[in-house]
Amino acid sequence: MIKVGITGVGFMGWIHYLAYQKSTGIEISAICTRNQQKLAGDWTSIQGNFGPPGEQVDVGSWNCHSEWESLLADENVDLVDICLPPDLHATKAIQALQAGKHVLIEKPMALSAQQCDEIVEAAALANRQVFVAHVLPFFPEYAFLREAVSSGEYGKLLGGHFNRVISDPTWLGDFWDAEKVGGPLIDLHVHDAHLIRVLFGMPKRLQCRARLRGDVVEYGNTHFEFADQDLVVTASSGVIGQQGRSFMHSYEVHFEKATIQFSFAALADEPEVSPLKIFDHSGQVLRPDLGDGDPVHSFENEMAEVVQSLEAGRESTLLGGALARDAIILCHRQTQSALAGMAMDV
C-alpha cells in the first residue's frame, strides 16, 4: 500500500482526498496544514467549481502535521501530494524528493522551465518518481481521444484545435502575477499544452498572437508547427471580461478517416454540453457512451496511473515530470512569441 501525505488542504486537496477514498493500492496516511480547523477534520469551508463541497473528514487514523518538516520526517509517508499555491511547488517538491519521498504535484509543475528541470534532476538524484497531476487526459472525452490516437483506428492524425477559456477570476488576487500563479497560460492553457505534447509530440516552432495584460498573455491564439507538415494544430486560451460564461473547453481533432469533437461550457444559467461525437468516413455521426460524467472518476484514474507507475518502477507516460516540464516550456514560448510579435523556435 502506498502511503500519501497531502500538503495543502484546499479545493484540490479535497478532490484528491475524494479520489483516494475510491482508489486501490494507495491511501492517505497524513496531512499537513497550519489551519487548525482543517487539521481537526473540519473541511466544510472548502468550495470549488466542480464536485461536492467540503465536509467533516475523519482524520483519526492519520498523522496530522502542522509543520512541513514534520511531514517530511514522517516514516509512514511514501508520497507527498503537493496541493499548495504554484509558487511553492518547486521548493516543496525538491525538499520532499531530497527527504526520500515520491512526489505528486498539482499542476502547474512550477512557474519556470528552470524550476521544472531542478525538480526532474532532484528526482533522478533521489531515485524517486515525480508525478504532475495533469488530470485532463483522464477525463473521458480526452481519454477517448488518446485511445483513438494510439489505436490508429481512424488512420493518420492530422491535427486539431483546442480551446480553453474562463471569465476573469477576480477572486484570485495573484492570478496575473507571473511570480505567484502565472496567468492564463501557466494556470489554464497548460492543460492543453500538455495534451498537445502527449498527442503530437514536441512542436518545433510556434507563433502566438495575443492580447496582453502587462507582460502576461490575457487571451491568445497559437499555431504549433511540427516536423510533420501535415499536422495543423492550433489552440485558443485565456480570459474574457464577461462573467456569464465562467469556463469552457472544447476540441476538434482531425484524422484521415474521422473527426472527433467535444465541448462543454459552464454558463450563468445552466451548463451547455456538446457531447463527444465522431464524424466518420462513411458519413455517420457516432455518439459513444462515456459514462456518468462524474469528474472525480477522472482523478481516481489519475491515482491509478500513479500506483501502476510506482509498482512497475517506471516513469508515467502521462504524469511524468519531463512531460510536464515540456508543457511549461510551451507556455513560456507562447508568451515570448506574443511579446515579440513573431514565431519562436521551441
Image (cartoon, rainbow, N blue to C red):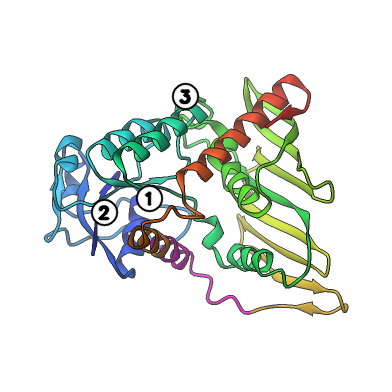
**Closer to us: 31 or 45:** 31
First in sequence, mark 2 or 3: give its number. Answer: 2
Q: Which residue is mark 1?
A: 11
3D distance between C-alphas at marks 2 and 1: 10 Å
Q: Is residue 246 visible?
A: no
- What amino acid type should be assigned to the residue bearing mark 2? Trp
In the image, residue 175 lies at what x, y percent?
A: 50, 32
State the quadrant of the N terminus.
Answer: bottom left
Q: Which residue is mark 3?
A: 179
First in sequence, mark 2 or 1: give its number. Answer: 1
Residue at 57 percent across and 42 percent down: it is 190
Q: Based on the displayed image, in which of its 4 quarters is residue 44 positioned? A: bottom left
Give the number of callouts: 3
Between circles 2 and 3, the one closer to the viewer is: 3
> Are there few (<14), some (14-19), or many (20+) residues within 10 Å of tag 3?
few
- What amino acid type should be assigned to the residue bearing mark 1? Phe
Q: Is residue 298 within the magenta segment?
A: yes
Q: Based on the displayed image, in which of its 4 quarters is residue 334 positioned? A: top right
28 relative to 165 in the view: left or right: left
Query: In the image, which residues are magenta?
Result: 289-303
Q: Which residue is mark 2?
A: 43
Tag 2 and tag 3, C-beta contact below 8 Å: no
Tag 2 and tag 1, C-beta contact below 8 Å: no
First in sequence, mark 3 or 1: give its number. Answer: 1
The local secondary structure at tag 1 comes to helix
The local secondary structure at tag 3 comes to loop
Residue at 55 percent across and 58 percent down: it is 137
121 relative to 255 in the view: left or right: left
> Are there few (<14), some (14-19), or many (20+) residues within 10 Å of tag 2?
some
Q: Is residue 46 within the magenta segment?
A: no
